[in-house]
Amino acid sequence: MFQWDVELNATSYDFQLSTSEDFSSPLVNTNITKLYYIEKNVIEWESNYYWRVKPDSEPMGWIGTSGF
């Protein structure tokens, strides 16, 4: 499960999950209204992944990138 904090004035969030740090080919690229995203299908546990979130109230860019 991927989870993040609420952002002021945000009503939805763009969420991306990728195997590359530059997100050139995201495995998941979706817009959601919740403060979490659950992915069960594309993750292979021996691989490295990166994820990031962009609230609709933040048109200037993504808020943080995390990896695992």
Image (cartoon, helix red, strand yellow):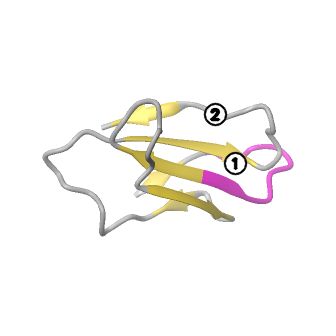
The three-letter code of the residue at mark 2 reads Ile
In this view, the mark in front (1 or 2): 2
Q: For residue 38, which quarter of the picture? A: bottom left
Considering the image in quadrants, where does the C terminus appear? top left
Residue 34: where, in percent of width, then height? 63, 64
Callout 1 crowding tier (Cα within 10 Å): few <14, some 14–19, many ≥20? few
Q: Which mark is residue 48?
A: none
Q: Is residue 19 magenta?
A: no
Q: Residue 63: which disc?
A: 2
**Regarding mark 1 in the picture, which secondary structure is present there?**
loop
Q: Is residue 52 left or right of residue 38?
A: right
For the N terminus, the image quarter is bottom left
- Residue at the (19%, 55%) spot, across then down: 44
Q: Position of residue 33 (x, y in %)?
A: 69, 65
Give 4 or 39, whichever is nearer the viewer. Answer: 39
Magenta span: predominant SS is loop
**Between 2 and 50, which is closer to the camera in this rendering?**
50
Residue under pointer 1 = 6
